Image (cartoon, helix red, strand yellow):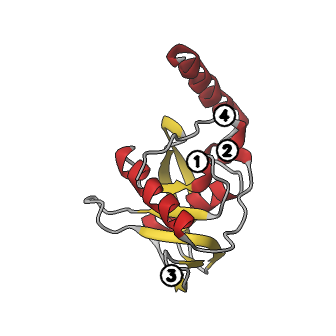
Amino acid sequence: MAKLDILEFPDPRLRTIAKPVADVDHRIHQLLDDMFETLYAAPGIGLAATQVNIHKQVVVIDISDEQTQPLVFINPAITVLEGEEHEYDEGCLSVPGFYETITRPDKIRVTALDREGKSFEMLPEGLLAVCIQHELDHLNGKLFVDYLSPLKRQRIKKKLEKQHRQNG
């Protein structure tokens, strides 16, 4: 396993739309292992392959405090179910140090392939539903800052660009 480098906003590679995975093979298994190592080391609760500059439809999530409930979503697709939208404070490993309130649907249906390439369906709610939507946005070249006002997004961009210059 290897810890991967996480791209940070405003890196243009974060805007790349991920391609579907054709075969769930040993290369995808290695990617999943590396992504979980990266996620847990960060630490975070979700990571899309786009964030590590691999533009395939692969997402790993673990919302457990103990990092003991790893979830894999390959070629995920969601459907919003009837219900309410809720506000959540979202952060992102690609936008380090910033948390903003984002409104998203609270109930979704997700279909995807698991680590073995088997199709499954899930009906997550709450934090897991929000996390899945956040990570699927990454696969579509979208970041949570895109839900903010242009002024807020620009302020975050300028602060991160300044940090990148200072850190070399």
Residue at (56, 72) in percent of width and height:
25
First reached walking from the N terminus: tag 2 or tag 3: 2
Residue 23, given in percent of the width and then of the height, sits at 64, 74
Q: Quadrant of residue 127?
A: bottom left
Disc 2 marks a residue whose amino acid type is Leu
Query: Viewer-nearest of labels 4 and 1?
Result: 1
Furthest toward the top, the residue is 166
Q: Amino acid at mark 4?
A: Pro
Q: Nearer the viewer, residue 146 or 82?
A: 146
Give how far apart the Cα atoms at labels 2 and 4 are.
8 Å
Distance, label 4 to label 1, CA atoms, is 12 Å
Mark linked to residue 123: 3
* Residue at disc 3, secondary structure: loop
Q: CA distance from mark 1 to mark 2?
A: 6 Å
| Residue picked out by circle 4 | 10
Q: For mark 1, give the secondary structure.
A: helix
Whichever of labels 1 and 2 marks the residue nearer the N terminus, that label is 2
Residue most toward the left? 66
Secondary element type, mark 2 = helix
